[in-house]
Image (spheres, helix red, strand yellow):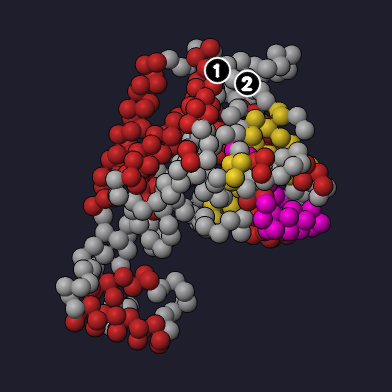
Amino acid sequence: MPTYRILDQEGAIVDKSRQPPDISHEDIVSLYKHMVSVSIMDLIMFDAQRQGKVSFYMVSAGEEGIAVGSASSLSPKDPIFAQYRETGIFQYRGFTPQDFMAQLFATKDDPGRGRNMPVHYGSTKYHIHTISSPLATQIPQASGAAYAVKMQNMQNPTDEQRVVACYFGEGAASEGDFHAALNIAATRACPVLFICRNNGYAISTPTLEQYRGDGIASRGVGYGIDTIRVDGNDILAVREVTRQARNLALEQGGRPVLIEAMSYRVSHHSTSDDSFAYRAKVEVEDWKRRDNPITRLRKYMETNGLWDEEKEKELRSEARKSVLDAYRKAEKEKHPPLRSMMTDVYEEMTEEQVEQMAKMKSMVERYPDEYDVSGFDGGLEGLKVDGGR
């Protein structure tokens, strides 16, 4: 299956006989700024993990264009099911450095109450379901959500018609959840975009050891799903493909579309991984030098007089300062109150939970030297339930 692209590796238009990308200069610069901001935060937080400031981190190096480019063509109200390299989506939809740091440092300002691993973001405000660690579970969930959205679209035809976007890596496509999800979406004609980031590696397993067929795109065809393969390092192509795929997904009451975005995972899988144990360092350095979505778009912008070195230095300086300011503030913030370990399970805490919390409070009071709760909002008082008990 051919790969759709608008820009080549030098940032030049591939097919000059076609109309130029339907995007303003201001929007192009905005996309670039979002990608750079994500990459700078990734560098800072990767180092922070190595220094023991956070327990875990995953970077998006080389794949920023897939998240930012696709997000720019979705409606802000479209529900999203992400995996863990979609930081650019949160960035594009309005997440601030303070929002990222609250989750990464599990502060009292984290909407997830500090219950998730770092980089497992989520946002009700921005219609993004919380990321979960088990691989591929979000894919059938997205199909189910898309069926619900299909019903809502039918019941409210004058409202903005929505689709669901689901992101995953090519490694996740080896899970049974992937196949069940595509079949459900196809047979129920669900308005869902399955966006696969094919970055060459499922942790340490290269694609050559994952499948023998024509990538992931060929599987979509097998399920009767409209499918396209796009150059994931070309943010303008990703944007255009997602725009057209979204329109297609809303035709005839709803239908799924599979997008395979071809990229390369420049980084280690996570801070728990040393990728040089299974791939040559020269391979990674070659990709860094040869092509990535940030440098490709920058070349296009410079060719068209939209960008220069002075603007680049200013952007990187501002982005770094913004992230570091939020980082330093989050470092000093307290964690959520201790009672948040038990809240949000039931509408009201059960008698058993109230009893358990009282016992926990008693234990901490009995052995204060063993249990330092000063880092939690409210300290020991944070174990009181409503009503002061």
Residue type for callout 2: Leu
In the figure, is residue 233 to the left or right of 101? right
> Which comes before the other along the chain, label 1 or label 2?
2
The residue tagged with tag 2: helix, strand or loop? loop
User: Which residue: 38% across, 71% down?
Assistant: 341
Residue 42 percent across, percent down from the top left: 41, 39
Provide residue 379's location: percent of width, then percent of height.
Answer: 23, 69
Label 1–label 2 contact, CB within 8 A: yes
Residue 51 in sight here: yes
Where on the picture, by quarter, is residue 372? bottom left
Question: Distance from label 1 to label 2 (Cα)?
Answer: 8 Å
For residue 7, which numbered disc appears in the image?
2
Q: Is residue 205 left or right of residue 339?
A: right
- Report crowding for label 1: few under 14, some 14 to 19, many 20 or more residues within 10 A (C-alpha): many
**Residue 388 seen in the current view:** no
The residue pinned by badge 1 equals 300
- Which region is colored magenta? 174-199
Front in this rendered view, residue 253 or 267: 267
* SS at mark 1 in the image: helix
- 34 relative to 158, above or below: above
Q: Is residue 3 magenta?
A: no
Q: On the rendered structure, is 294 left or right of 210?
A: left
